[in-house]
Image (tube, rainbow, N blue to C red):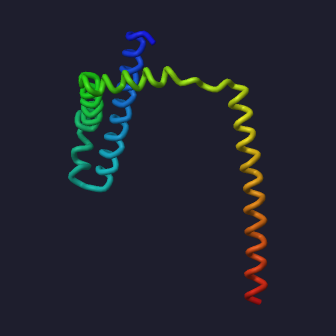
Amino acid sequence: MEKQTTRKIITLSFVCAAIIAYIVVNVIFRAMAGAFGPVARYYSIDWLNNGLPVAAAFITFVSLQFNKKIVAWAEDVVIEVSKVVWPTGRDTFTLTAVVCFFCGISAVLLMTIDFVAKNLVQFIIQ
């Protein structure tokens, strides 16, 4: 895989991590505002209400993007994932059908065992 494509994938991944950080900080801040009065006062301030999650997202992105060790690790991950041989659509469909079939057999077997055990316990109790 090209170096430029790898860098684009890594940057996009770091942007996704920043978005997740934004959502997490926003949800935690909102929950704490609902639970604690002093936090609710800060939550009512617009620049703090929106600025804290944005700051967390920005710090997350910058700390990931400009850390040489994390970028090297991410490059290794992208290279390893590009080596994976993905199954074809037909293989995926066939294996999914096999799994569904055996789940059905397992369900019938467990239902039978449960029915027998329930009737056995009722017979013993009466």
Image coords of residue 40 (percent x, y) = 26, 49
Q: Is residue 98 left or right of residue 40?
A: right
**Quadrant of residue 88 in the image?**
top right
Which residue occupies the foreground of this view, 2 or 19?
Answer: 2
Image coords of residue 124 (percent x, y) = 75, 86
Which residue occupies the foreground of this view, 23 or 85?
Answer: 85
For the C terminus, the image quarter is bottom right
Residue that sits furthest to the bottom in the current view: 126
Query: Going 70% across and 29% down the picture, which residue do you hit?
Result: 91
Q: How many marks?
A: 0
Query: Going 21% across and 52% down the picture, which residue do you hit?
Result: 38
Query: Going 24% across and 30% down the picture, which residue do you hit?
Result: 59
**Quadrant of residue 20 in the image?**
top left
Which residue occupies the foreground of this view, 44 or 18?
Answer: 18
Q: Is residue 84 above or below residue 56?
A: above
Q: Is residue 103 above or below residue 64?
A: below
Q: Is residue 68 left or right of residue 7?
A: left
Q: Is residue 67 left or right of residue 30?
A: left
For the N terminus, the image quarter is top left
**Quadrant of residue 80 in the image?**
top left
Image coords of residue 69 (percent x, y) = 26, 26
